[in-house]
Amino acid sequence: MTERWAIYTDGACRGNPGPGGWGAVLYRDGGANELSGAESNTTNNRMELTAPVEALSALPDSSHVSLYTDSQYVKNGITVWISNWKRNGWKTSNGKQVKNQDLWQALDQSTQRHVVEWYWVKGHSGEAGNERADELANKAIEQMFA
């Protein structure tokens, strides 16, 4: 039987680049699992990408996922831009190398294992899952300095 999940992800960075964190809340059958992590020198976009990569990697294969992100960069990248990047050898429309290619490739690979529907939510708008993912990302940064 296919498992159904709702996942909220977020990334945070203190300075850009600087110390960063990511958080993900994975909901299933009324319960929630939380994941988070941090890096000492990264960018906000890398943390926004790391969150769904890690969340999707934690699921059993062939899960059905509704994934919510407050990052237009992540949502548009994986649903719109990535097909052209792959076709163009990981180059943008102006011929430059795609930034964060390693994470885009990891996210692309993760999405091949599941059925993923992508949703954008406005950040810091009271959406409980998004607010919790943001808290997890920021706590991960703080824990690096504890």
Image: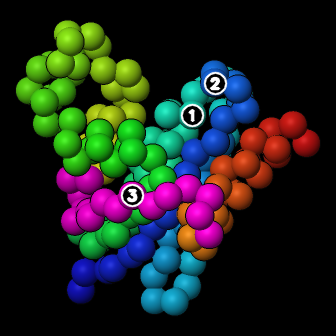
Residue at image location 46% in from the left, 89% down from the top: 29
Query: Which residue range is magenta in the image?
Result: 111-126
Taking 47 as reference, is 136 above or below it? below
Q: CA distance from mark 3 to mark 2?
A: 22 Å
Q: Mark 2 sits on what residue?
A: 16
Residue located 82% across and 44% down the image: 142
In the image shown, does 39 or 132 lie closer to the viewer? 132
Label 1 SS: helix
Give the labeled residue for mark 1: 44
Q: Position of residue 75 (x, y in %)?
A: 33, 48
Task: Report the mark closest to the observer, 1 or 3.
Answer: 3
Expressed as whole percent of the image width and height from the top left, the position of residue 37 reads 64, 46
Circles 1 and 3, Cβ within 8 Å, touching? The answer is no
The three-letter code of the residue at mark 1 reads: Asn
User: For numbered disc 3, what is the local secondary structure?
Assistant: strand
Q: Say which label, 2 or 1, has the lower sequence index.
A: 2
Query: Is residue 20 rendered to the left or right of residue 6?
Result: right
**C-alpha span from label 2 to label 1:** 6 Å
Task: Determine the residue located farthest toward the top in the rendered image.
Answer: 95
Task: Please name the amino acid that badge 2 sits on.
Answer: Asn
Q: Which residue does the numbered mark 3 point to in the structure image? A: 120
Query: Are dots 2 and 1 in contact, CB under 8 Å?
Result: yes
